[in-house]
Image (cartoon, rainbow, N blue to C red):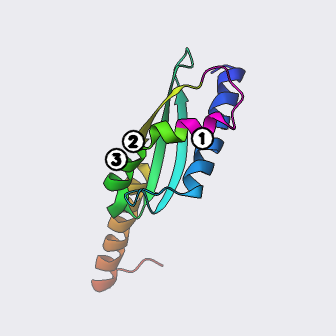
Amino acid sequence: MSRRSEQLAANLREAVQEVINRGFHDPRISGLITITNVRLSDDLVDATLTVSVLPHEREDLTFHGLRDAVPYIRKEIGKKIDSKRLPRLSFKLDSSLKHQLGVLEALRKVEEEREKRGEAQP
């Protein structure tokens, strides 16, 4: 990734996160929404923003609301980012946190089973 694309990705992440933090009038978009990654195409025309949503029960609804809000988000970040052309935005759900929580839950269950059998680790 070139210096220019790294800078644009960082600026996009910050600007989009700021717009999301201000909130929307769309009731579908709620919860703790975090931009975890921004990936730009080589020609800087497309940007894929990976988002994490908590609580996980709100993921799908919030994701659909964000996709519908792309024109508004793009307009708002255009006021903040000094660029001749803004990339097209698309969102992708970050499932890594959900996976990590699943692993931690499984480990917790194993520990509980050990304790029940009297095999607690020192």
Label 2 neighbourhood size at 10 Å, few (<14), some (14-19), many (20+)?
A: some
Q: Quadrant of residue 11?
A: top right
Please identify, in this view, whether the residue under mark 2 or under mark 1 is nearer the observer.
1
Magenta extent: 74-85
Residue visible at 62% across and 38% down in the picture: 77
Amino acid beneath label 1: Glu
Instruction: Find the distance from the CA under tag 3 to the CA under tag 2.
Output: 5 Å
C-beta proximity under 8 Å, tags 1 and 3? no
> Does 110 lie within the magenta span?
no
Look at mark 3 in the image and give the residue it sits on. Answer: 64
For numbered disc 3, what is the local secondary structure?
Answer: helix
For numbered disc 1, what is the local secondary structure?
Answer: helix
Mark 2 and mark 1 lie on one chain; the one further toward the N terminus is 2
Residue visible at 62% across and 32% down in the picture: 9
**Disc number at residue 67?**
2
In percent of width and height, residue 48 lies at 48, 32
Asked if residue 105 shows in the view, the reply is yes
In percent of width and height, residue 118 lies at 32, 85
For numbered disc 2, what is the local secondary structure?
Answer: helix
**Disc number at residue 76?**
1
Please identify, in this view, whether the residue under mark 1 or under mark 3 is nearer the observer.
1
